[in-house]
Amino acid sequence: MVTRAGLAGIRATPTGPLRRGALFLAGALASPREVASIFPSSRSLARRIAAQVDPNSDGAIVEFGPGTGAVTAALIERGIAAQRLILIERDVQFVALLRERFPGASVVLGSALDANGTVMRMERPIAAVVSGLPLLNFDPEAREALITQSLLWLKPGAPFVQVSFGWQPPASGRAGWVTRRAGVVWHNMPPATVWVYSAKST
């Protein structure tokens, strides 16, 4: 049986897939409601998420709940410089790992639900928000508040990208939102849907 105690010894090993997988599983066991899945995002899912972000857009990319950095790595692979990334993560172990893997990125220990002050202090335009948070574990009001606040940072049409393991959008949306499905990634455990929210032009 895999336990948190059994996984703890792996944390001191060099950064690598085994350590990242162990850390992710340990985080899921410790806080199951705060982790979307017991498995990190697959390469296919990470690339599908990153594909929704225009690497030529101006400004920073904010990532909520980067975990061990699967999507972060895909964003960099897409051509987005690490220096443009603001990673907001509430798990201390994940934060330490992210700082090792992506030394050029701004890695912030904190909650996405309280991120407004953190992001606004950056004094940088925001080109996109990418979220790996388990929004279906949040109450509907918290989901809408998070997306609404994120869209206020973005210019109309800029994306808020959300991964979900449900078949319906994690937030139903408001009159000022545009919601689209960016695809279902079957080669992921479990299969995941990528949703993109954007503010309507006024």
Image (tube, rainbow, N blue to C red):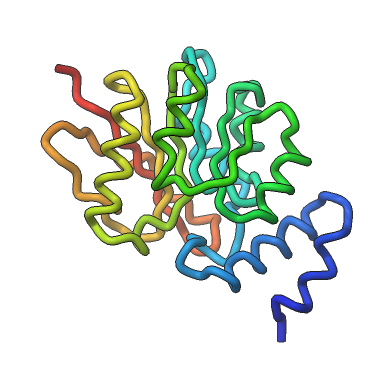
Above or below, 134 relative to 100: below
Is 12 positioned to the left or the right of 175 in the image?
Answer: right
Residue 73 location, x and y as percent? 66, 37
Q: Position of 178 compared to 19: left or right? A: left
Residue placed most toward the observer, 178 or 94: 94
Splitting the image into 4 quarters, where does residue 116 fall? top left
Most extreme residue toward the left, as rendered?
175
Residue at the image point whose x is 82% and y is 49% from the top: 15
Examine the rendered structure and indicate whether residue 180 appears above or below residue 124.
Answer: below
User: Residue, x 46% and y 38% (percent of image)?
Assistant: 130
Location of residue 187 (image quadrant) = bottom right
Residue 120 is left or right of residue 147, and the answer is: right
Where is residue 191? Give x, y as percent. 47, 59
Residue depicted at 55% across the width and 52% down the height: 90
Residue at point 30%, 31% (across, down)? 151
The quadrant the C terminus occupies is top left
Where's residue 97, x and y in %?
73, 48
Check the image and report above or below for 79 versus 69: above
**Residue 66 position within the rendered picture, expressed as x and y whole percent measured from the top left:** 57, 46
Seen as rendered, the residue at the extreme right is 13
